[in-house]
Image: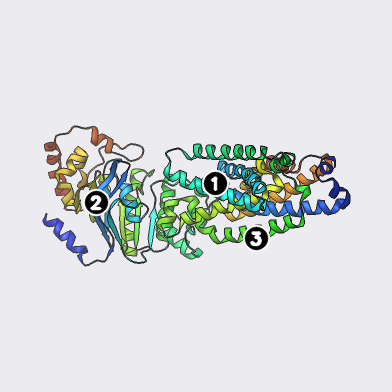
Amino acid sequence: MQHLMRKKPMKGMRVMFDDFFVRAMIAGIGVALITAPLGCFIVWRRMAYFGDTISHSALLGVALGFLLQINISVAVFTIAALVSLSLLSLQKHVKLSSDSILGILSHSALASGLVVIAFMPGLRVDLTGYLFGDILAVSRIDIAIIYGGGLLVLLVLAWIWRPLLAETVSYDLARAEGLKPEFTRLVFMLLVALIVAIAMKIVGILLITALLIIPASTARRFAASPEMMAVGAMIAGVLSVIAGLYCSMSFDTPSGPSIVVAALMLFLVTSIVPLTKGAR
Amino acid sequence: MTENSSEVRKFDSAKELVGAEHVGVRAGDRWLVRHVDLQVRQGEIVTLIGPNGSGKSTTAKIVLGLLDPNEGHVRKSKNLRIGYVPQSLAIDLNLPLTVKRLMTLTADHDLQEIKVALHSVGASHTLNCAVQELSGGEFQRVLLARAIISKPQLLVLDEPVQGVDYSGEIALYELVGALRDQLHCGILLISHDLHIVMAATDTVVCLNGHVCCQGSPQRVANDPEYHRLFGVRAADTLALYHHDHDHHHHADGSIIAQGETCECPLDAASDAQKTDERDAGNV
């Protein structure tokens, strides 16, 4: 509670306890539902570092959003999308491994973000919220953004599901058989940028990748098809958010890390559950 | 040469599915392949052979449109349905994928179609297996089933027998021939194993960065360029199925390294070849 009061003293006193907790829950569950299926693709395509890179670039988006006084979510999405596009173009034209390119982009985006923020002294106070999430300060507009944007993400993902999955198995095969893997890959990267912009407020820039990867990994053991794994990841993600937020409330811990720790617990506990025959 | 012209005539009237005209692809300053002409017609099996690094896969990728040639161009008939078995396909262990689900990767098919396709490659028992659990031979068969399920007009098979033991290789190549008859499709086959390929194919294109020689298996087998490229191994190529298998393969089925390092005189090769040609008459 103290943690909460410190951040939003006026609101914290005025608004009923239940009200913001319920809002936090709704927002967190929404984020978990969107990150889960996208996270499955991040896992299948071994793109964890890409997820990190995009989310780190979000800090630069936050800084520029404040600097240019535009909507933070829009600024974050724009920067994240630009970083995705420069990644695609660097991979084509620079003779460096993807890993090194990601390392360069990831850390330079994070560092530039921190430097730009340092030029704006008033902003320093809120940095923790952006880095680790500030789920208890979620407004009704935030919820609208999460569910509106989330619905868009899920619809687009359903639309590109088949070509994206085919491209995940083999780019050449998908292209040879008449799908459009370059286009699909581009759309997927923009979806990741969008998800970073949406999820940032809830889990924080540094932990978005965890929410993409851990629930998907938890679901892996119980899934026999890609689609089952996506649904399983949604369930695991939602359970993690519920458990994490209750812990955050009870022990006054920051919300983002609490959710991630809950997701990790769920992963560990389900890892030792023996499987019934038939599941893989 | 007479054999060659009869072979060509057989496909003269057949519809061209895809044709490469003087294509070349460059990586930096180096040409991976250059001056390649080839065409695949309906019902024809065209086999690309050549040592490792001779540009077989590159040529196939140009034909498929996966690589844009730096020179020359590719003709492709309109709305060509293509089935493709790539050279390497590593499916991440984290991707839960059964054979059944793999079959609908690029297009919808009902269970009946899936069962028919798997049955035709002799892999019916794998239907509900996870793809990562299959043996090398099973996986290749499943990939082949996946490629043919859409009844393609052109089938491109890049080293389809890798990881398959010798008897399995023969069975798979026989299967490729049977599929050609059944689907009446054109097939572009890539192999670095000469033996079985030569018997199961209509046209051979011998690559080594460029087209060394091209034509019916008989013609290519008699071409000095071919012998220069493959050494003594080339000699018994046409003796397929007719003699005991008297040499050794690497684990991957490759025999090329031996041929390349072996400084065998051409005379010895052509001596051996004479006897083999007699055998070849019965193929």
Name which residue type carries label 3: Leu
Instruction: Give the residue at mark 3.
Output: A151
Q: Chain of mark 2?
A: B
Q: Which residue is mark 2?
A: B36
Are discs 2 and 3 located on one and the same chain?
no
Q: Nearer the viewer, mark 1 or mark 2?
A: 1
Identify residue type, mark 1.
Val
Seen at 29% across and 36% down, the residue is B248
- The residue type indicated by label 2 comes to Val
Q: Secondary structure at mark 3?
A: helix
- Considering only order in the chain, which callout, 1 or 3, is on the residue closer to the N terminus? 1
| Chain of the residue displaying label 3 | A
Q: Is residue A163 above or below residue B264?
A: below
Q: Label 1 belongs to which residue?
A: A83
Separation (CA) of disc 2 from disc 3: 50 Å
Q: Chain of mark 1?
A: A
From the viewer's perspective, is B60 left or right of A147? left
Q: Residues within 10 Å of mark 3 (few under 14, many from 20)?
A: some
